[in-house]
Image (spheres, rainbow, N blue to C red):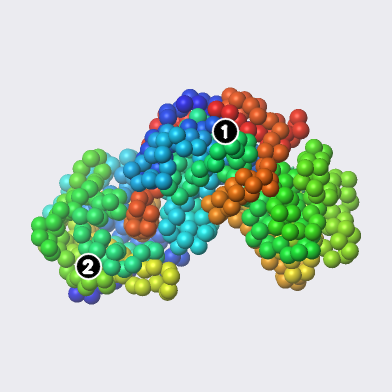
Amino acid sequence: MKAVCWRGPNNVQVETVPDPQILNPRDAVVKITSTAICGSDLHLYDGYIPALRGGDILGHEFMGEIVETGAEVKNLAVGDRVVVPFTIACGRCFFCERQLWSLCDNSNPHAAAAEKLYGFSGSGLFGYSQIYGGYAGGQAEYARVPFADVGPTKVPHGLTDEQVLFLTDVFPTGYMAVESAGIQPGDTVAVWGCGAVGLFAIVSAYLLGAERVIAIDRVPERLAMARDRAKAETIDYEETDDVVEALKQMTGGRGPDVCVDAVGLEAHGTSFTAKLDRVKHAARLTTDRPYALREAIQACRKGGVVSIPGVYGGFLDKIPFGAAFAKGLTFKMGQTHVHRYIGPLMERVQAAEVDPSFVITHSVPLDKAPEMYRTFREKEDGCIKVVLKP
Amino acid sequence: MSLPRPRNDRAAGSGSGIDLVQAERWGAFLAGGSLTLFGLTRRSLPGLGLAAAGGGLIARALLRTSGTAPASGTGVAVARSVTVNRPIAELYAYWRDLRNLPRIMDHLESVTLDDDRRSHWVAKAPLGTKVEWDAEIAEDRTNELISWRSIAGAEIPNRGSVRFDAAPVGRGSEVTVTLAYDPPAGAVGTAVAKLLGEEPDQQVREDLRRFKAVMEAGEAPTVDGQPSGRED
Ligand SMILES: NC(=O)c1ccc[n+]([C@@H]2O[C@H](COP(=O)([O-])OP(=O)(O)OC[C@H]3O[C@@H](n4cnc5c(N)ncnc54)[C@H](O)[C@@H]3O)[C@@H](O)[C@H]2O)c1
Ligand SMILES: [Zn+2]
Ligand SMILES: [Zn+2]
């Protein structure tokens, strides 16, 4: 089959590789009809997530048709059309039983490596480095799906791939970012980053009853989409001296009740510390550039919630922890518990409360993946979300 | 019989370094030829290349030391715990049927039962060789503890135990495994240990991880055999 393989930083190739097979009784194999590139893939592309091996198959947002099931998979049949959570979870451990699917104890075959790095291991993830299990990803014609009896969710008739594809990751991720913050009536939510994750955080904040959402980015097309399609007020941080001060002024001096960092470890910034971060980052002296996170902590109102769907991988410099402590902030973060949200959000899509396809700007054949990674990384050509068609 | 007392009990899960004294003991253990008792044939281990390099040494060590009397006090012992989200009775029953152990312990090829107390164990060794011994159940307390030991005359005298304790409510059961080996002493082993730098308790940890996955999820996660752009 054809698959998108990582060959090193800034280098992905579409290659011919063997077809996947059932390896465990709870596996299934999916023939992929649509698959997306995620902001998380850019961290791999840019070389900031360790422990990738040349030849690893990328991709964790995919859907398609079941073509084979293992002996223990009773709830799916060949021909079923499914969306597949990017987190791999057993459904039976302490964490899965408590709906903390991305913390599953039993799905990472390389758990020892993750333990070395983080003390404990989270769940396995598709196409996301050896540390997260080394699973082959879904930017390919086929993928093997472990624990297929609890992950893949059937798509109701009448919904297109484009409407349901993002239930695999970015819609639940934006949703969990605000749901876990416990939105109250009257809340103002600030969202850093207007990529797909940020956009879905905005949409979800309104679904959950937020009064106002203020979105921060610098890319004109993204700010426009946040404004026109997701109904947020916007701040262009390159045109604004002090984002924290601007947010304070926009909220009567209170600060936003909930601050969402939907940017992650490759934040771009304009201040002196941000430039220092970039230099250190380029020299691999620091692992993460927490520029948006710093602002979120500074801006958040007293007793508010800072929610972090943006990915971080290592040690963070100059986090204003004193401010967080002084203001009694609550932090929410982590890989998304996709299994928890995929059903309820599918219902919202079916009820036409949301049409997630609005984020798609590019839909191209799988062969175009190498140039699309570049276009997406450079935010060129108005690129916000890329769908690949195997 | 009381529980074998591990000398480098790391059950608390803190350190992962291996000190020199331990390394030396570990070396002695390796000289006994039982290198792969801790799974050095596993493809994923970083020491794999070194294992290949050390293979000849090990084979020679095997030849030279077999039949030597065990030098007491030079052995290796490890203890490790894991919490499994299943009732104790189920975990005990699985373990009490020793034939299940090769599914959990990667280095074991087979365990066959002679009768209710005696069993025959076959472990994988380097270069396609095998190490075999007979063992007997030393102690068996239903839903509490099982311990076993090799029968006199084994090339690498060894013993092990598994203990089952209830975890706090809603958290399943705590399973603690100890393994101890009293290999013949040997100088070659030290050199091999230096080459490998492998930790004995890491292997027990992996075995327990597999046990937990098999009991909870019904299977152990794997990526062996999946596609990639590599030639392997
Ligand atoms: N927690 C999870 O499970 C999960 C799941 C999916 C994605 N993510 C992460 O979410 C983040 C966003 O993903 P995406 O797909 O939307 O990525 P993306 O690259 O499309 O979007 C990131 C956006 O952040 C903006 N940005 C950069 N620096 C900024 C700053 N200082 N202030 C405000 N905005 C800034 C960029 O201009 C861009 O529009 C990534 O870190 C990704 O890894 C996490
Ligand atoms: Zn993603
Ligand atoms: Zn689980």
**Left or right, residue B29 beside residue A27:** left
A12 to B215, vertically: above or below: above
A123 to A44, vertically: above or below: below
Q: Position of residue B153 (x, y in %)?
A: 11, 59
Tell me the distance, in whole angstroms, between the alpha carbons under discs 2 and 1. Answer: 53 Å
Residue found at x 38% / y 45%? A73
Q: Chain of mark 2?
A: B
Q: Quadrant of the N terminus of chain B?
A: bottom left
Q: Chain of mark 1?
A: A
Q: Which residue is mark 2?
A: B147
Q: Position of residue A47 (x, y in %)?
A: 61, 40
Is any part of residue B206 visible from this angle? no
Residue found at x 40% / y 72%? B167
Is any part of residue A332 visible from this angle? yes
Q: Position of residue A223 (x, y in %)?
A: 81, 43
Task: Find numbered disc 2 in the image and state the secondary structure of the residue it sits on.
Answer: strand
Residue found at x 47% / y 51%? A89
Looking at the picture, tell me which residue is in the foreground, A250 or A150.
Answer: A150
Looking at the picture, tell me which residue is in the foreground, B80 or A108.
Answer: A108
Q: Which residue is mark 1?
A: A34
Q: Quadrant of the C terminus of chain B?
A: top left
